[in-house]
Amino acid sequence: MRSIVCIKRVPDSEARVRVSADGRTIDDSGVKYVMNPYDEYALEEALRLKEEAGEGTVTAITVGPEEARETLRSALAMGADDGVLLRSNGSIDGVAVAQALADEITARDYDLVLFGKQAIDDDNMQVPAMVAQMLSLPCATVVVGLDIEGGVARAKREIEGGHEIVEFDLPGIVAAQKGLNDPRYPSLKGIMAAKRKPMEEKDVALAEPTIELLGLTPPPARAEPQIVGEGPEAVPELVRRLREEAKVL
Amino acid sequence: MADILAYAETRDGSLRPVAGEVVAAARKLADQLGGQALAVVTGGPGSAESAADLARFGADRILVTEAESLDLYQPDATVEILVSAAESLAPGAILFPASAQGKDLSARVAARLGVALASEVTEIAVEDRAPVVTRPMYGGKAYGRFRFLRSPALISIRPNVFPATVDPREGAMESMPPVDVVPRTRVVAIESAERTALDVREAPVVVAGGRGLQDAANWRLLEDLVEALGDDATLGASRAVVDAGWRPHSEQVGQTGKVVSPNLYFAIGISGAIQHLAGMRTAGVIVAVNKDAEAPIFGVANYGVVGDLFEVLPRLTEEIRAARGSGG
């Protein structure tokens, strides 16, 4: 199995997000960056497929700033064989990012391209399906189960109230959801080995976005919180307020 | 001037609840832009009959492709139907539900049309006769406002946020032929959950539990509360309990789970980690029960009860059952 895993450097989910003074970016002072959590499921799946097949390669690709080198290094430490940094400041337009990835992927040999189902910064949840359309590849998104046999992938895709079973012939694209597997932690040996693994870097010019960010704001403020009371004795008053004040019962 | 297309999702030949929300949002936008709202429906047998209902939410025309082969969502065929509708009708915007199907489809259509897609939009305004949308980013820790530089504007709307306002129009039914494609991606079956539970993103009422429940077996207390709240309610869970294997990840609420906007959200035994708050802070009314008065969840809760949930919860279930029983 030859897999390509597309990953992204994002602020940690525990990070506080503050809007910068320019009103268009986030203030990243003190923000810890990590590999997008969903990408870890994608990478783990690629590593398992390679291990089960007993042969193959896992290549990690990212579109991002120079600092994304560290994210690639984490992927190599988990077990990816090589990394590719497509140096760019990124784009808010999923189409532009998908095109850059599609251009890189199409020049390579692969059986499977894996993504996390969405990046937890832009929350676009677009790029995997877009790359699939651009490369005329089959694609299953939000995947929580994957079996590959005889060149056919059978994916279990999360939908409201159940799952869809999706089949396609390789090569194809899978976007991983939490639950697909249990990602490994990099071993000390893996971290040491990562330092000697090949990493390719090149500049890419992303297409002009067809959408414009007018501004970023903090989330809307919520009503002043109220403590109704303590213990079960507070429950009748809570229910009264839910009925009469909030009118939600 | 600009017509608005609304993709009205079906399953098993019936409209999904979110279809009314999408068509109603398209109606409103069409009125602001001076155009028509056109519903696009694809699906298996029964879809055309059930699509007629979209007139109620303001569809001027209802374009239906009904085919045996579309009983399950077939992305390749559905993309072609949408692309062909976009090319022949030249709409100003295409609205999708930000559902599992709508998000898959909208991204594919955007790539085919070469235009941007705004996902999980929570607000649509009109400025200079063009749509301007607001959408949560960073799991809801920040909101972005966007305008589109090319037409059509592709927008997926977050379930449960836009009202399915009744505003009847003619709803003239037209049939669109299926487009002949060799499917690359084949959806072969749907496996439903054991009970036909509402999805946590689409339920008007969510009862979510956290580590304070202490054991997976204690979820029966939450199930009792869900039952007392009626058919609109479903279960949610914090990341900690999903990671502990107590609950399925499909119930997880938070930045790395589902971002939800129900009318009413109960946070039971959930302390309120940043990533959890990001996933539920757009709920209409938040009720928190926690024994720690300092828990961050109380910072976003409209109503908090400090106390032992094993004492508070049975009483809450009882009182709600009584309140609803008395005509509530």
Image: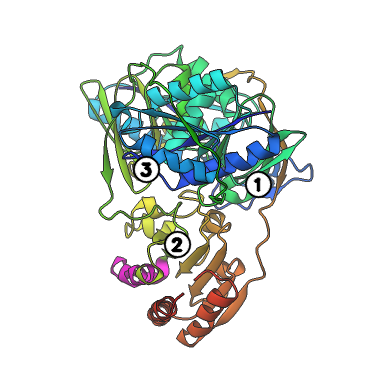
Residue A40 visible in rendering: no
Q: Are marks 3 and 1 in contact (CB under 8 Å)?
A: no
Which amino acid is tagged 1? Tyr
Residue at the location (55% across, 45% down)? B168
Residue that carries the numbered disc 3 in the rendered image: A159
* Image coordinates for residue B55, horizontal then vertical, percent: 50, 41
Q: Distance between the residues labelled 3 and 1?
A: 26 Å
The residue tagged with tag 2: helix, strand or loop?
A: strand
Q: Residue at x 61, y 68 (%)?
A: B299
Residue B298 percent coordinates (x, y)? 57, 71
Determine the CA span between mark 2 and mark 1: 23 Å
Q: Does the magenta stretch include residue A185?
A: no
- Nearer the viewer's eye, disc 3 or disc 1? 3
Please report contact status of discs 2 and 1: CB closer than 8 Å, yes or no.
Answer: no
Q: Which one is in front, B258 or A53?
A: B258
Which residue in the structure is indicated by mark 1? B143
Q: Which chain carries label 2?
A: B
Query: Taking A138 as reference, is B144 above or below it?
Result: below
Which residue, given by chain and number where applicable, does mark 2 sit on? B206
- Is B222 colored magenta in this rendering? yes
Magenta-highlighted residues: B211-226
